[in-house]
Amino acid sequence: MLSGCSVSSLAARFAFFPPDPATYAVRKDEAAGRLVASNVPRDGAMDVLRVDTRRGSKVVAFFLRDPAARLTVLYSHGNAADLGQLYDLFVQLKVNLKVNLMGYDYSGYGASTGKPSEENTYADIEAVYQCLETEYGISQEDLILYGQSVGSGPTLHLASRLPRLRGVVLHSAILSGLRVVCHVNFTFCFDIYKNVKKIKKVKSPVLVIHGTDDDVVNWSHGKELWKLAREPYDPLWIKGGGHCNLELYPDFIRHLSKFIREMENITTKMRLKKIRQSLQPAKKAHRVHTGTTTTFTTNCCCRIRVRKPSCPSCNFSCSCCSGLKSFFSCRLFKCSTCFSCSLKSCFRCPTCFSCSLKSCFKCPTCFSCSCKSCFKCPTSFSCNCRSCFKCCCCGSCGDAQ
């Protein structure tokens, strides 16, 4: 039987397929004094970077600049590609979306050092985000995180920690690693990429894109992530789309561009207002508040509780008290004036009633006593009349107190 660690390692093996050999290499151009990538077109608007992570890896990143860009996209790719294969896509996204774009290779991918693992991908994206802040002055307010397939894991990890993030795009995203491998509907403690939990912590708008015919990560993953998002944006379900071909559909770039334009128009002030509104407690539903509760009992299990409403002036005409009207209109006693008082002393000694309540009960001799035990078992009355009350227990128990 496999242990939790073994299953987690198995899921990790299915999660990472770095191209072997890598499709590019990185070297330093002595003449230019900068890093360049081989097998990738020379691009004066692209910087090639090596970024140190907290777990000891050196990850390679491509930063593509657009002089007119207002936002930057941090792109986390799928599990079987590296930057050399993604360069053309990055250029197309930069041009069509009019954004800056930062793409990076996970530890063990492309020219990045280390080994691929869940924790390493978290350290990788954290380091690249810090690079954007320190080297390019890009803050979270001007950043959109983009995660494709397994890249949704590090994307939601970082998004859950950045409350002022501009937006998130989840492209063919997963609920968790084991949900893809084993098709389960619950989360194990040893599962990897628990996006199903982290999506609930993301405070920014979330766009979900998924193909309806995805045979690698089922469409249900995308639909569930969209439902769990705190601020879901209109999703894009591409009919007939698979796992790796969504960029080929015209609706893909059209819908993604619309999302970027709307995120550009959302100011920090508007975002903070939405966050404050989401933190305010929901308005409480209108409830019937009751005042005093009077209880009298007959020596056994029978008990009557009468609740006095907090709005007696409404004469039971309001919606909150209408349900009580029928209760108070019933004739518990023969005397109709019994409930004309404010119910403060109705169930004490019978002499407290405004009427001469000797006719209210069948046996008038019951009130010839000092009324100290009138409302106990009927056998305590001086008349020993069991018919005074119609309690199902006291009428036949014969237990005097």
Image (cartoon, helix red, strand yellow):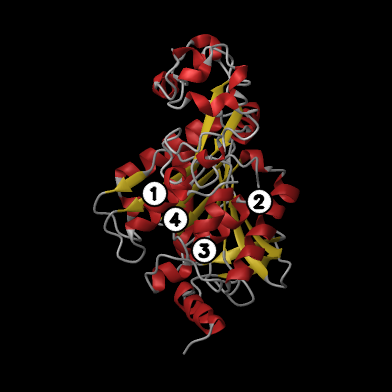
- Determine the CA span between mark 1 and mark 4: 20 Å
CB of mark 3 within 8 Å of CB of mark 2? no
Labelled disc at residue 209:
1
Residue at 52% x, 12% y is 340
Q: Give the mark nearest the N terminus, 3 or 2.
A: 3
Report the mark closest to the observer, 1 or 4.
1
Report the mark closest to the observer, 4 or 2.
2
- Determine the CA span between mark 3 and mark 2: 26 Å
- Determine the CA span between mark 4 and mark 3: 9 Å
Q: Give the mark nearest the N terminus, 1 or 4.
A: 4
Give the residue at mark 4: 88
Give the residue at mark 3: 83
How dense is the environment of label 4, judged by Cα within 10 Å: few (below 14), some, or many (20 and up)?
A: few
How dense is the environment of label 3, judged by Cα within 10 Å: few (below 14), some, or many (20 and up)?
A: many
Report the mark closest to the observer, 1 or 2.
2
Decide: is 324 above or below 221.
above
Residue at 45% x, 71% y is 178
Q: Hey, what amino acid is under mark 2?
A: Arg
Report the mark closest to the observer, 3 or 1.
1
Percent x, y of residue 61: 61, 60
Residue at 53% x, 63% y is 194
Give the residue at mark 2: 161
Q: Hey, what amino acid is under mark 4?
A: Asp
Percent x, y of residue 8: 52, 78
In the displayed structure image, the side of residue 290 where residue 331 appears, left or right: left
